Image: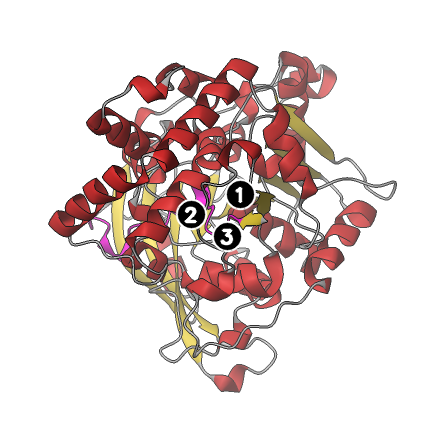
Amino acid sequence: MRRTLVAAVTMALVMGTASAAGATATAGPDRTAGESRTSAAADIKTRLLAIPGMKVISEEKVGAHRFFTLTYTQPVDHKNPKKGTFEQQFTLLHKDVKRPTVFHTSGYYLWPDPERSEPARIIDGNEVSLEHRFFAPSAPAKADWSKMNIRQAADDQHRLFTALKKIYTKKWISTGASKGGMTATYYERFHPKDMDGVVAYVAPNDVDNKEDVRYDEFFRTVGPKACRTSLQALEREGLIRRAPMVKKLKAMAATDGVTFNTLGGVNKAYESAITGLSWGFWQYSGQEGCWDVPAKPAKLSDDELFNLLNELGGFYGGGDTSLSFFTPYYFQAGTELGYPSVKTPKHLKGLVKYPETTPRDYVPKSIPMTFKPKAMADIDTWVQKNANQMLFLNGEWDPWAAEPFRLGKGAKDSYVLTVPKASHLAEIGELPAKQKALATSRILKWAGVAPKAVQQDPSKAKPLARFDVRLDQKDTERQRMLRMLPR
């Protein structure tokens, strides 16, 4: 039997756990440092508001940047605009209209705090971050779920880009991580003339949803053998002591007001958390997390075992509230994107009680779903034949890397790079020196800001912007929440 890991989500997903509408609104100056009082770019807010359908929700000053939260009116159906509109939320980290711009997509909700993606720091540019359609509040009042697809989302990006390009006239680079990286890739597939480069981080590519053997192979070889063995023993112990563990989970959930009706009750939710433990562990912890896994978990007390399982994986990701937030993701996974599944491993044989689930189980029955197997095959074929100035970055120890994007003979100036021993949080800065210089130099060139020294010697490439604690430091709260998400 295969265990479907339908709810295994990504770093990009966590970017949406809070609404950008809740961002603190602090009045900022109308003029960015370095901009002339008489220049056309002097009042960027005025220029933004001059775009039909654009609204500014909030603004705050962040160092040399101005951080805006905005909405832009989008048609529900780009092929038939008469079918209604919705307000799509996005943020803008503005530095200077004379700088290039990064178009960041999370693929999910919008993270409310000012942040800068790695490509934006590399090119020292502006950054637009767009919330995916159908994730509240960027959703129609009455959802037509047939319009929740990769083409409509790509058209959302194209329309917003077309509007902003009149202000930010320099080169643009699109980026995103996990589902956000997938979204950036889909955008390039349908609007290849918009961006000057694409940097897709840890983007899964489930070409054939029925063939997931690569995930089985991944878990048989990933990481140090001793760590795999200890993790397997921990999973097994979690199911052997199911009764006391579920009792503790019921008590904790009752106190916190968490229910598990969607998954079919606390017992099934608990099993789902345990069978998905290895996936979540390698996705986010990796080798550093091996120190937290005891070699002999059978010696742990019930309290110690429960606390460790909760710390490493989290039990609330399968709760009703968490699952309901991500209905749009499950819908896409079950209609176009595909979803991973793995065989029940030998160490859990005889301990697994519940049948596998699919995205259909997480989406209200009132929403019709039909899987379209040609959707991802189309994207995969296009990338292999037409990729131009695209960079795909993967983590060696990230489960999603088992099915990555590939490049064919038709690809031009494009690359697939893997960070050794890295997780789903892999970054360009973690690559070996030569590959890091290659990736950095190409991004600088695509953005049109490669210094002369880098043009002559790519090994000298480095980010143009200095590290900023507020903008560039990984959000520890987001990573804490990350472990609470369903696998």
Residue 26 visible: no
Residue 52 percent location from the top left of the image? 43, 71
Considering depth in this image, is 11 or 25 the residue closer to the camera? 11
| Closer to the camera in the image, 89 or 418 | 418
Label 1–label 3 contact, CB within 8 A = no
- Looking at numbered disc 1 in the image, what kind of residue is underneath it? Ser
Quickly name the residue at label 3: 6
Looking at this view, name the residue that lies furthest to the right.
Answer: 409
Where residue 307 sits: x, y (%)?
24, 30
At label 2, which amino acid type do we have? Answer: Leu
Q: What is the number of the mark on residue 178?
A: 1
Q: Is residue 54 magenta?
A: no
Q: Which mark is residue 13?
A: 2
- Considering only order in the chain, which callout, 3 or 1, is on the residue closer to the N terminus? 3
Would you call the spot at circle 2 few (<14 residues within 10 Å), some (14-19), or many (20 or more)?
many
- Residues in magenta, as a range: 4-27
Q: Earlier in the sequence, mark 1 or mark 2?
A: 2
Dividing the picture into quarters, in which one does residue 454 lie?
top right
- Image coordinates of residue 392 in percent, x first then y, are 65, 36
